Amino acid sequence: MQEIIRRLLAELGENPAREGLIDTPKRVEKALKFLTSGYTADIDAVLNNALFTVDYNEMVIVKDIDFYSLCEHHLLPFFGRCHIAYIPQGRVIGLSKIPRIVEIFARRLQIQERMTSEIGETIKRAIDPLGVAVVLEATHLCMAMRGVEKQNSFAITSAMLGGFQNDARTRMEFLELIRRPDLQPRASQCHSTPPASSA
Ligand SMILES: [Zn+2]
């Protein structure tokens, strides 16, 4: 990988041998491997020992999960927050594992829409809940930095499965809860746009 990055630097008109760039190929390789480490992560191993049988069937919400990913079209970052809810059907996922699931799908070359549905499907497969909802809010540097469609560099995607798809009240309850300012210690103006009702 380092040789390719050295060639890329030369193609960009740089001198890969100058002091500031001499170790760049090594650093870029290390960074890219880390940022795409989700390909080799084993979701089943992550969830192993973290699935519990419980008598609880109310909505579980984990909100404001920060994530950083790379858009597969430009290899530039998109990043933001993920909100997840599910309604258990006898089984729950250890709360700390929810951000881990997000991280595994974020650390790949992604598009926001696919990442949203992959997270939802993974939770569905793991515990077969009555419903799963995933909302991703992200800024895309490929749009923001290149100055194209700047007004759209912030995107919201959602995946609504099961009860969140079939029952408008359940869906509204979730959307209301993730937008409540008092539950949003790090609220930003970005939250003023309501997420799409289904994906
Ligand atoms: Zn892009």
Image: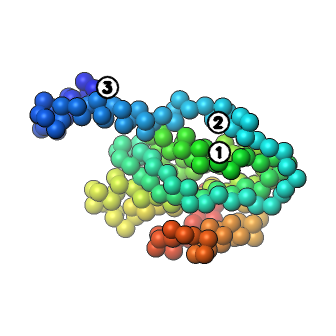
Is 132 displayed left or right of 154 in the figure? right
Residue type, label 2? Val
Q: Residue at horizontal 59%, vertical 44%?
A: 100
- Sequence order check, earlier mark of 1 and 3: 3
What is the spatial separation of the Cα atoms under label 3 and label 2, in whole angstroms?
28 Å
State the image quarter where residue 36 is shown: top left
Crowd around label 3: few <14 · some 14–19 · many ≥20 (10 Å) = few
* Label 2 SS: helix
Question: On the image, numbered disc 2 is attached to which residue?
Answer: 46
State the image quarter where residue 46 is shown: top right
* Vertical order, 149 against 7 (above or below): below
Question: On the image, numbered disc 3 is attached to which residue?
Answer: 1
Q: CB atoms at circles 1 and 2 under 8 Å apart?
A: yes
Residue 190 in percent (x, y) is at 47, 69
Residue type, label 3? Met
Q: Nearer the viewer, residue 138 or 54?
A: 54
